[in-house]
Structures are given as C-alpha cells and as structure tokens.
Image (cartoon, rainbow, N blue to C red):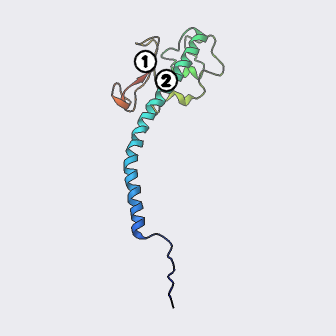
Amino acid sequence: MRQYRKKQKGFTLIEIMVVVVIIGILIGLVAPNIVGNVDEARVTAAKADISTLVDALERYYMDNSTYPTTDQGLGALVEKPTATPEPRNWRAQGYIKRKKMLQDPWGNEYRYISPGASGPYDLYSLGADAQEGGEGVQADIGQWDL
C-alpha cells in the first residue's frame, strides 16, 4: 500500500526568519526618510500658518487702518484688544478661528513685533530650536520667507 503523505500547511522557521529580515531591512531603509520628513513638514506647516496670519493681519489693517501693536500681539486677531489703540471696526468673529494657530508646530508662540525691522510688522517662528538664528529646521521662519 502506498502511504500518502499529508501536506503540511504553514510556514517553516526559515521562511518566517527570511520575512522578518526583509521587513527589518525595509524599516531600516524607510525610517530615516520618514523621520527627516517630519521636520520638513513642520517647517512647511509654519510657513502656511504665517501666511494665514499675514492674511489675517492684512484684513485687520483694512478694517482698522492700523496693525495690532506689539503689546496687543497676535491675540488681537482672536479677541478684541482693550489696550490703546482700540480697533474701530474689529470683526465680532475675529480674524482667525483657532487660538492654537498662534503657536508654531513646535509648540512655541509665534513672535510678532510692530513696527518691524522688515516692514510694518515682523511675524516669525524661532524654528525647532526656539532660539534666534540657526540653520535648516532650526532656522527662523518669518513672513519674509513667503
């Protein structure tokens, strides 16, 4: 009589090890690219936020014929300032919807100075290192970069 072998179903230990090694190699190649892209994405987000804040500041100026003072800061885009000079035609709904937008992607407040060195105001983020200057993702990002 012939003996029929049952086909075994499943993977051998070697097949599993080969798959684990291949996955490890792929992770080793892809992970550094993803980590590097996170910092670049934050820089891009900061530039987009600054662009939105610049638009809001221009709308504020069109309504009130002045930009918020340094003391009033960017908070004047969310809540009506009570400090002098009080805006004459401040929009009841504000100029930006989220107060969180006043923070850069690294969790620090955007810097606002009026009048600024580069125009009627300077609006910028200190970048990843939260210090003046720097290079790459640690560089300052401002409306002058738009």
How many labels sit on residues?
2
Work out which residue is located at the far front of the displayed protein and give it: 1
The one of 71 and 28 positioned closer to us in this rendering: 28
Indicate whether 134 appears above or below 122. Answer: below
Res 17 quadrant in image: bottom left
For the residue labelled by badge 1, is the local secondary structure a helix, a strand or a loop?
helix
The residue where tag 1 is placed is: 144
Say which quarter of the image contains residue 80.
top right
Query: Mark 1: few, some, or many residues within 10 Å (few <14, many ≥20)?
Result: few
Q: Position of residue 31 (x, y in %)?
A: 40, 46
Residue drawn where x is 43% and y is 70% of the image: 12
Question: Which residue in the rendered view is the most extreme toward the bottom?
Answer: 1
Determine whether 20 is above or below 56 in the image: below
Query: At 60% from the left edge and 21% from the top edge, which residue is drawn?
Result: 95
Front residue (pair 34, 135): 34
Q: Kindly identify the residue that appears in the image at 43 percent across and 13 percent down.
A: 116
Q: Amino acid at mark 2?
A: Ile
| Identity, as a three-letter code, of the amino acid under mark 1 | Trp
Q: Secondary structure at mark 2?
A: helix
On the rendered image, what quadrant is the C terminus found in?
Answer: top left
- The picture places residue 8, in percent across and down from the top left corner, at 49, 76
The earlier-in-sequence mark between 1 and 2 is 2
Cα separation between marks 1 and 2: 10 Å
On the image, numbered disc 2 is attached to which residue?
50
Residue 15 or 47: which is nearer the viewer?
A: 15
